[in-house]
Amino acid sequence: MRITSLEPARCAPLPDAGFGALRTERGNLPLDSVDVAARISGLDAGVEVTQGFRNPFDVTLEATYVFPLPDRAAVTAFTMEADDRVIEGVLKERGQARADYDQALREGRRAAIAEEDRPDVFTIRVGNILPGERVTIRLTMSQPLPYEDGAATFRFPLVVAPRYIPGDPIDGPPAGDGTAPDTDAVPDASRITPPVLLPGFPAPVRLSLTATVDAGGLELRELASSLHVVEEKAGTVRLRPGERLDRDFILRAAFEASTSLQLDGAGTFALTVVPPALEAARRPRDLVLLLDRSGSMGGWKMVAARRAAARIVDTLTLQDRFAVLTFDSVVEPAFEGLTEGSDRARYRAVEHLARVDARGGTELLEPLRQAIALLDGPQDRERVVVLVTDGQVGNEDQILEQAGGALSAMRVHAVGIDRAVNAAFLGRLAGLGAGRCELVESEDRLDAAMEQIHRRIGAPLVTDLSLKDLDIEPDTVTHLGSIFPGVPLRVHGRYRGGSSVTVRGLAAGAPWEQGVPGTVVDNPAIRAVWARAHLRELEDRYAMGEHQLEPEIVRVSLEYGVLCRFTAYVAVDTRQVAEGGPEHRVIQPVEPPSGWEQPASAPLSFGFAAMAASPPRGPMAVPDPGISAALGAPAPPPAGMPGGHPRAPMFARSAPSRPATHGLDTVRAQLVAELDRLKALGAPDVLYLADLGSRLAALATFLGGHAELAALARELEAAERPGADPEALRLRAVQVLTSLTGGAPAAEPDAPRRPFWKRP
């Protein structure tokens, strides 16, 4: 055999090339750019996010992008720009917005829809993008900034990290196009699990971020960014070009806050109360420490979590009783029950923590149940739960429904450790228990964060807060909570009259109050921020079982023009640009979160990059297991497959896969999805059929060698060979898959999707 050497100039590596880094002449990713422009004034920020989409294909395109926003941000405007036209979005009930969007696409018109799936996870779909066309989406929002120890923090998340999805798959079409099946514990799992790019993939999105800071008349002492390299000039911070969307952007502005009452003149107030100079009264505590040891906590996060947990144990005294539980898919106590906080017990606890490493999936509900059971005792002691985790779970509503009521009677502190932390959920848990949520984004920040945690893990300065003098509309004041050292109280609400307020509470068991005069300000963000906070409280109550609140949630959202989980912004062009709906659909893959370790056994791709290397072949639904194998990486298993714990996200799997035999029901949902796509394929495509064969071969192996499925896989894998009949192979595949799935009907592609919370 003669081997001809290639000239080096003809095979030079691509810039930023790595394993699985693909590039085509057409391009392969619909999201082209993200621009974030923030204007920070005091303890509030106005933000405009601009997303640029392009269609590199020669057919019409629908692009889906799952992305994060700050969990307290109130989204108040949405626009779509294309072909020199600007279409303003309209906020509607979510089901109606989806119906309008789907109808516009069927009629060949451009349309875009923005939906909230979690307080910090959103989905945008942009449909009927013409070949070669660019479409710009703009989101406008307002958000309050947390203030602690003399600094306000602007945190802007840039990636939705993979989340652990517990539960069993449910029947019916998926709610979204993500990588995980919907389950009984997370009925919208397919909406919050976008595919993840291969490590080393060239930066696919141009990121631009600027923040202009005004301390609101106060002296601005310092600006600091902990996770990104920035440039600062005249109060404007700018992100260095070339940064990736793989971690939160965090900017801290150091200045002195002051007690104030702002009245917007239209019935909304914002109250800030600086902590008084008091000593906190310390009561004996019963404390349960929960440490997340799941696979996503690997690397620096596990080291930081162990250190944080050990520092918390060090705060205990002989007056306290405590327990330490470490958890992944199982819960392991350091010792039985609650024990006195002696030197010996604390040493045993720290010794147990030192042996903890990352593994398995984040089964959070069970350790919370055990903590509640341990603290179900006399009420003469303060009951405290401390959770150390990255919070990367998908079943937030299930946890709130089954544990939220009991946790609201305790004090819950959350310590979030990650560069892309699930801050929204941890904040919800801490809010239920009138506790604090402290976020640690890097090892460098750990000591400073632990100092804050050490001060606040004890009793707050002022409890049992209430407001008087201001004529407040009933049930409109946001959560009062407690006043902690170094953390001003921030409260919003609606009022009917009055120009001042008196804050009352208990400090060291004695009455405490402080009067605050009001100032009328021209700041429309106050109204939006209140509406967002009020909606979040109503949504949490809905998740905990008060389903009768849905009409009220929709009413508040529409009346105040703030997006929530029960509404959606939809922008529809009046001009027809295509013959019908999009000919190709793609879901934008996201970056692997910075700092996440990837075990050798974990799959490195959910398939988008491989699909993008060939021309579009019709609608794309859930990315397919076999495509990762085509790139030389193990295929991501379907629900229940080995590869760590069932339904764990790819980064949470640490154990090597073990051969197993499973019933056909475990893969039926994926076979139905393959059948639906095959029927929608139209003209047979030999590349698609060969890819399908590789995916079915992986499923057959998972099933322990399913003969009929393996035989079909072999036939399809030969589709590219000379003499193959693609149409006969397609019909053969339809016949076999129909038989294996029991004749399951294909989902109607244009049928409006029901909102996920209304699904059985």
Image (cartoon, grey):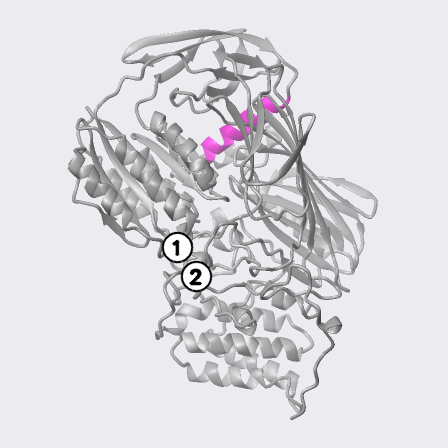
The quadrant of the picture occupied by the N terminus is bottom right
Q: Which mark is residue 120?
A: none
Residue 583: percent from left, percent from top: 71, 63
Closer to us: 367 or 34: 34
Q: Which residue is mark 2?
A: 599
Using a 10 Å C-alpha cutoff, classify the residue at mark 1 as few (fewer than 14 neighbours), some (14 to 19) or many (20 or more). many
Q: Give me the C-alpha separation between circle 1 and circle 2.
A: 9 Å
Are the residues flagged by discs 1 and 2 in contact, CB closer than 8 Å? yes
- Whether residue 121 is visible, yes or no, is yes
Residue 87: percent from left, percent from top: 76, 41
Q: Nearer the viewer, mark 1 or mark 2?
A: 2
Label 1: element kind: helix
- Whether residue 620 is visible, yes or no, is no
Identify residue type, mark 2: Pro
Q: On screen, 34 above or below 688? A: above
Closer to us: 316 or 284: 316
- The span picked out in magenta is 524-540
Residue 254: percent from left, percent from top: 54, 23
Closer to us: 405 or 162: 162
Q: Which residue is mark 1?
A: 295
Q: Is 346 displayed left or right of 64 in the figure? A: left
